[in-house]
Image (cartoon, coloured by chain):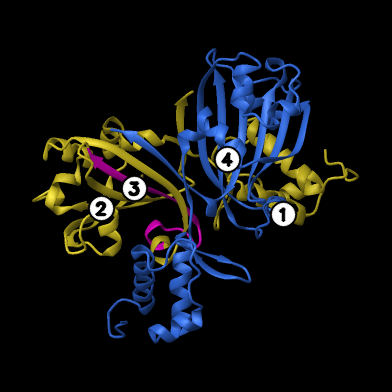
Chain colours: A blue, B yellow
Amino acid sequence: MINKNAPHPLYHQVKDHLEAKIVSGEWPKGFQIPTEKELAERFEVSTITIKRAVLELVHQGVLYRQRGKGTFVTSKKETDLQSLVTLKYGQKEGVKHPHHTKEFHTQEANLLIAKLLEVDEEDKVYKLSRIKMNDSMPIGLEYTYLPVKLLPDLKEEMIQDELLYSVLQNHYSIELGKAKIYFSTLTANEAEAELLQIPVGEQLFVIERFTRTVQGEVIEYSKFIVRQEHYQFYIEVNI
Amino acid sequence: MINKNAPHPLYHQVKDHLEAKIVSGEWPKGFQIPTEKELAERFEVSTITIKRAVLELVHQGVLYRQRGKGTFVTSKKETDLQSLVTLKYGQKEGVKHPHHTKEFHTQEANLLIAKLLEVDEEDKVYKLSRIKMNDSMPIGLEYTYLPVKLLPDLKEEMIQDELLYSVLQNHYSIELGKAKIYFSTLTANEAEAELLQIPVGEQLFVIERFTRTVQGEVIEYSKFIVRQEHYQFYIEVNI
């Protein structure tokens, strides 16, 4: 199988073989791959070569490691980015993936939040922190800030089971205009790692959403921090 | 400035102060921040505290480090994801950010490419590898695969200065249908690090694009690997 006289490195060949098993479906999504020792025996190469090939596939996101358990074929849920801002998705979503509320209170907007919500630093804002769960596993952190003056008397119960956009439209009769959604990543710090039960330093996806009313006021700023293992984000566009 | 008797850690306070300087514009985009020693003196805390605050902001992508140069306020170009699939953007783009072609040839589709392009493993495909430049700095790697049977006699010169979508439409009279764009990240391996002149292990954005004709055939698969320092991707949606 492996040609030890080929010009390109051995681990490239091993990587190609492993990739072929995944692409062909011989190793399906979620499958636990054999140990490095087993693979080294099967391919008749050193475990160092196997390690390097596996590491490349981990770095590419094709495989992932679970500490103390082994190495698995990545299985991500395809998620349409547009669905993050539609109500239809949200209504199903709220039931399927409940939130655990950590914080809900009003506070003065600090410099950063004031800038994001386009309010004054002394203006009051609601701060909502939630953990998104999936089968009792934490999969994401959500931080939402809302201007108090546009949403008087918002109560935690109102957003407990209902989607935020529904509350804005139905309880406050706010006409929503546009949402702008930014993408980035961050390296989990201690607090994030603890909340998500992951190692410090894991790369996480960050989605920031600004929602404006049809009048152009910022009605919401949210920051979603989600595990990459769980989502494969995409958009689909007509050309 | 710093309250040493406050209940939350000192580095949190330092981080808040640094963030305020950035948000207020006192430290503008691209600004080189003072050294850790200078900051430690200014805030009257240890350099360990400063290091930790700075590291958190680096992990959040607010600051970035350049080896041997110092720490800077991140300055990213806002890039509309939709623009990746419009011709208007591309035409300007081709001139402003030229490509350096590394590879252009036909080959047999291997298992992975065959699956992605929905062709047989024995079918011929074009492989195009390019480096995207900005002011003679490499900022991204682009790998494109195209099915030969739908695009006979494609020549390197044809796509040298013209955008791929224009070539498909104008030279081949292909009606483009939908594009699906996936988002992920990867950790730079040695080859990628060398091509992009960055350290091994840097987190890179990966954008994969599948383009279909109106008949539904996959006409193109591209993988763009870009530096996070240079782009802030977003989409804007009407609600």
The answer to which of marks 3 and 2 sits earlier in the sequence is 2
Mark 3 packing: few (<14 Cα in 10 Å), some, or many (20+)? Answer: some
Measure how far apart labels 1 and 2 are at the Cα level: 41 Å
- Judge whether residue A224 can be spotted in this image: yes
Q: What range is drawn magenta here?
A: B194-213
Q: Nearer the viewer, mark 4 or mark 2?
A: 2
Question: Considering the numbered disc 2 on the image, is that residue within a helix, a strand or a loop?
Answer: helix
What residue would you read off at disc 3? Answer: B133
Residue at horizontal 74%, vertical 28%?
A: A157
Is label 1 on the same chain as label 3?
Answer: no
Q: Nearer the viewer, mark 4 or mark 3?
A: 3
Q: Which residue sits furthest left?
A: B153
Residue A32's place in the image compared with B78, above or below, is below
What residue would you read off at disc 1? Answer: A194
The disc labelled 1 sits on which kind of residue?
Glu
- Judge whether residue B200 can be spotted in this image: no
Judge left or right: residue A18 versus residue A71.
Answer: left
Residue at horizontal 28%, vertical 33%?
A: A239
Front residue of this view, candidates A108 and B22 = A108
Front residue of this view, candidates B158 and B86 = B86
Tell me where residue B95 appears, x and y as whole percent: 26, 38
Is label 1 on the same chain as label 2?
Answer: no
Q: Label 2 lies in what chain?
A: B
The answer to which quarter of the image holds residue B81 is top left
The disc labelled 3 sits on which kind of residue?
Met
What residue would you read off at disc 2? Answer: B117
Residue at horizontal 55%, vertical 58%?
A: B68
What residue would you read off at disc 4? Answer: B31
Q: Is residue B203 magenta?
A: yes
Question: Considering the numbered disc 1 on the image, is that residue within a helix, a strand or a loop?
Answer: helix
Judge left or right: residue A46 versus residue A218.
Answer: left
Question: Considering the numbered disc 3 on the image, is that residue within a helix, a strand or a loop?
Answer: strand
